[in-house]
Image (tube, grey):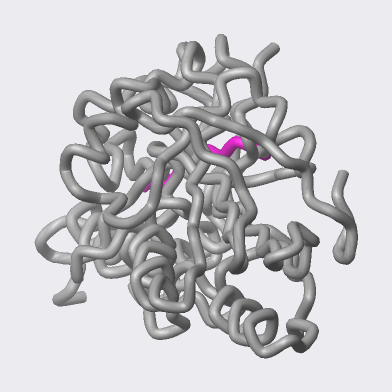
Amino acid sequence: MRVELLFWEGCPSYPTALAELREAMAGLALDPGAVVVRAVNTRSEAMAEGFVGSPTIRINGVDVQPPGEEPVGLTCRVYHRRDGRISPTPDPADLRDALRAAQGPTAGSR
Amino acid sequence: MTAIGDPAPTFSLPDTRGTRHEPGGPSPTVVVFTCNHCPYALAWHRRIIDVARDYADRGVRVLAINPNDSERYPRDSLEAMRARVRQREFEGVPYLRDESQAVARAYGAKTTPDVFVLDAGGVLRYRGAPDADHDDPTQDAAFLRGALDAVLDGRDPDPVETPPVGCSIKWKA
């Protein structure tokens, strides 16, 4: 499984997102150190990556919260928590669900 | 940049209908730099609007200012600001446009949100975050409310300053 966290230094949310991602991985017996962390520093890099904001977390290339029509750019990304709150980081439950889905249907029975 | 205890910069900025607003008057004024696209500003938004409602009867005015470059960040365009006002997201709070970014520069604003509390004499008495955690609505803008309570009672706020937390202001190139 390839887990990536893309961030822009101008937004302060990525350390929290990375910690929550690693915690979710540890909870599912995945290696928290396996996260590939990459900085997106310029608008051209953002365009090339399809980066719609910081942080962006992709598991096997799939965004944990599909960005829809969000424009590409160097900015903080808006996430929606399951209780309806707006947040700069994804809901940890969404991270866990995305990781479980990537593990496949047999992962929980091992 | 304005320091605590200094006279805050004066300004006159238009709201989304073109009506101009200035800080000052017989009661404290809260100046909040904010925007449409930042999750920190959005997460704290309701708490700040609630402050405006709760302190209106003591004469406190809250002025929200969007200083972001809307060419690079179209979600901060004047039309997008108008849409949020039409959706009643700014009840009791004028939403002002700082097109030249001169007001944000004069205040030394760094993020959205960045909160400044001015006393009735126009002196800066508090600057920083609304409260300690954007992710915890029960914080209820405690820093801001505490600062207003202190200023209204003739005391110094405690704390007088906290680090602003949020998205960097999007300066024009």
Name the residue nearer the viewer: B89 or B111: B89
Name the residue nearer the viewer: A95 or A71: A71
Magenta highlight range = A1-9
Q: Is residue B72 left or right of residue A101?
A: right
Image quadrant of residue A16?
bottom right
Question: In the image, is residue A22 above or below residue B137?
Answer: above
Image quadrant of residue B10?
top right
Q: Position of residue B129 (x, y in %)?
A: 62, 65
Question: In the image, is residue A87 above or below residue A45?
Answer: below
Q: Is residue B93 left or right of residue B126?
A: left
Q: Is residue B46 left or right of residue A14?
A: left
**Residue positioned 18% across, 55% down in the render:** A101
Q: Position of residue B16 (x, y in %)?
A: 35, 29
Q: Is residue B77 magenta?
A: no
Q: Residue furthest left?
A: A105
Q: Position of residue A80 (x, y in %)?
A: 26, 55
Evaluate whether residue B91 shows in this view: yes
**Residue positioned 24% across, 55% down in the render:** A98
Q: Residue furthest front?
A: B26
Q: Is residue A2 magenta?
A: yes
Question: In the image, is residue A90 above or below residue B76?
Answer: below
Name the residue nearer the viewer: B127 or A21: B127
Q: Position of residue B13 (x, y in %)?
A: 55, 30
Name the residue nearer the viewer: B13 or B32: B13
**Residue positioned 28% across, 30% down in the render:** B82
Evaluate whether residue A24 shows in this view: no
What count of labels does the image hold?
0
**Residue positioned 46% across, 72% down in the render:** A23
Q: In the picture, which quadrant includes the C terminus of chain A?
A: bottom left
Question: In the image, is residue A37 above or below residue A42?
Answer: below
